[in-house]
Image (cartoon, rainbow, N blue to C red):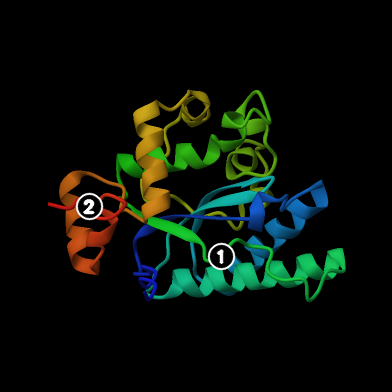
Amino acid sequence: MPRRPRLAAGDLAYHVLNRRVGRLPLFSKPSDYVVFEKILAESMERTRMRLVAYCLMPNHWHLLLWPRRDGELSEVLRWITVTHTQRWHAHHHSAGTGPIYQGRFKSFPVQTDAHFLTVARYVEHNALRAKLVDRAEKWQWSSLWRRTQGDPRLTVWLSAWPVDRPQDWSARVNRPQGVSELDALRTCVQRGRPFGEEGWMRRIVKRFGMESTLRPRGRPKSL
């Protein structure tokens, strides 16, 4: 069965995730994270893509992107993953040993209202959720850390948000997310389901032929 084309319409925000094949480590030391951040910075400089939030984790990464034009999301993600794969193999002297990523990136569109804030908080809360730090802003490999350092040079390749960022944003990110909210977001990751209010979600599903993202998994029950 052919794969459903990846949604890449412009002017929608997207949560994007990819992880190392076999859940093996993708970033083992600080320099591994630095290399990937340099790739992110390069990709933002060479395109008009807007990176609004991110968090790099030991075996995967989360990006919150806001492309301007159709097809830009796929183009930028292809460049990021191909470039990172090449540099990763060159650094580890492992050329010819196969892919480092488990497959195509996973993504879902996000409504640019309060739902956007929910996803941004989910992204920037990741290291705290994994107990890698005791405060989310202490995780150096994230947009939250960069924005809380008070150094504008650290945020030159991060973009403004489509909604106002609350003044107490760091405090909000550090609060636990509810189980139902996490379950909804994880379903969106797995299914590519739009995340937003019901009417917006159904409009996006109809417009882009994403009805399969709303259907339950598994075969239909026999009558």
Residue toward you, 217 or 179 = 217
Q: Residue 164: in sight, yes or no?
A: no
Image check: 217 left or right of 128? Answer: left
Instruction: Return the residue nearer the eye: 158 or 89.
Output: 89
Give neighbour class at mark 1: few <14, some 14-19, many 20+ (Cα, 10 Å).
Answer: few
Q: Is residue 66 visible to us here?
A: yes
Q: Nearer the viewer, mark 2 or mark 1?
A: 1
Instruction: Please rate how many residues cluster around mark 2, counting C-alpha atoms within 10 Å: few if below 14, some from 14 to 19, many from 20.
Output: some
What amino acid is at disc 2?
Met
Q: Are marks 2 and 1 in contact (CB under 8 Å)?
A: no
- Residue denoted by label 2: 201
Residue 223: image x %, image y %? 12, 52
Q: Is residue 215 above or below residue 147?
A: below
Q: CA distance from mark 2 to mark 1?
A: 26 Å
Q: Quadrant of residue 34?
A: bottom right
Q: Quadrant of residue 109?
A: bottom left
Q: Is residue 186 left or right of residue 111?
A: right
184, 2: nearer the viewer: 2
- Earlier along the polypeptide chain: callout 2 or callout 1? 1
The amino acid at mark 1 is Gly
- Disc on res. 103: 1
Q: Secondary structure at mark 2?
A: helix
